[in-house]
Amino acid sequence: MSHPTEPLRVSLVQGNTRWHDAAGNRDYYGEKIRALKGTTDLIVLPETFTSGFTNETLGNAETMDGPSLAWLRDAAADAGAVVTGSIVIRDGERCLNRLVWMRPDGTFETYDKRHLFRMAREHERYAGGDARLVVELKGWRICPMVCYDLRFPVWIRNRYGKSAADRFDYDALIFVANWPSARRHPWRTLLLARAIENLSYCIGVNRVGTDGNDLNYAGDSAVIDFVGQPLAELGAAELTVTVTLDPAALAAHRARFPAWMDADEFELKV
């Protein structure tokens, strides 16, 4: 069974995103990223970190040639680390809640939020994605997702390959979010559940403060290990925390408790 062998340093940036102020947010989060230079492998920002969680897509969407992608490229290069978070993106006639996985060398991958939060009418203004993203960093396989995706375990399910050379789909899950404080108990509970059921580290990065819709955010960003034990809990303050993920502990748990061997097989149609 193949596993990552190097520790992975992950930095959670729990910020108070400015409402509809992309330039201000780039300055704000840029300062936090610069403080992490040379100390981390991966920097995780909240969902829609340039605008807040908005349904005013026309005024806040950028293209993939816009200033925030260029800023992410520069930020990752300067920090010497991957930087990830989601942005409101216009792609032709569609608007997408798009997570960008930006590497220090300027190459990147994207994931479009699959599950759109209909209670805030997100599904009326955004198009949903149809493919998971799994990326590799220092031998770790990482599956980044966005906010409401957290509630859908079938989409998230971690599988193990059939042959001895195969691996788990991923070793760590990431959820970037704008998850209001009124639903903080489900947020905290589901992060634990997704880690336990998928034999994986689980990282959730939420925002704090109050947005332009008068929704309050309690943060509660966290790093959860594969048995549901919190390794970091950020509370409700503007805070940046770096946690090192241990590959040996993950491998030992998967070998000791191989629940994946009894998992149900299924095909997912999207």
Image: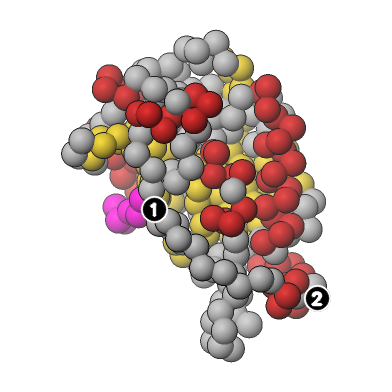
Residue marked by disc 2? 256
Assign a secondary structure to mark 1: loop
10 Å crowding of disc 2: few (<14), some (14-19), many (20+): few
* Quarter of the figure with the C terminus: bottom left
Q: As displayed, is residue 169 above or below residue 145?
A: below
Q: As displayed, is residue 249 above or below residue 39?
A: below
- Amino acid type at circle 1 is Asp
Asked whether, in this view, residue 41 is left or right of residue 5, the answer is: left
- Dominant SS of magenta comes to loop
The extreme bottom residue here reads 164
What residue is shown at x 45% (from left), y 61% (from top)?
A: 269
Q: In this view of the protein, which residue sits in the foreground, 171 or 27?
A: 171
Choose top left, top right, bottom left or bottom right for residue 79. top left
Q: As displayed, is residue 146 above or below residue 268?
A: above
Q: As displayed, is residue 221 above or below residue 251?
A: above
What residue is shown at x 19% (from left), y 39% (from top)?
A: 92
Q: Residue 100: x, y in percent?
A: 38, 46
How many marks the image carries: the answer is 2
Q: Residue 35: x, y in percent?
A: 50, 36
User: What span is colored magenta in the figure?
Assistant: 103-110
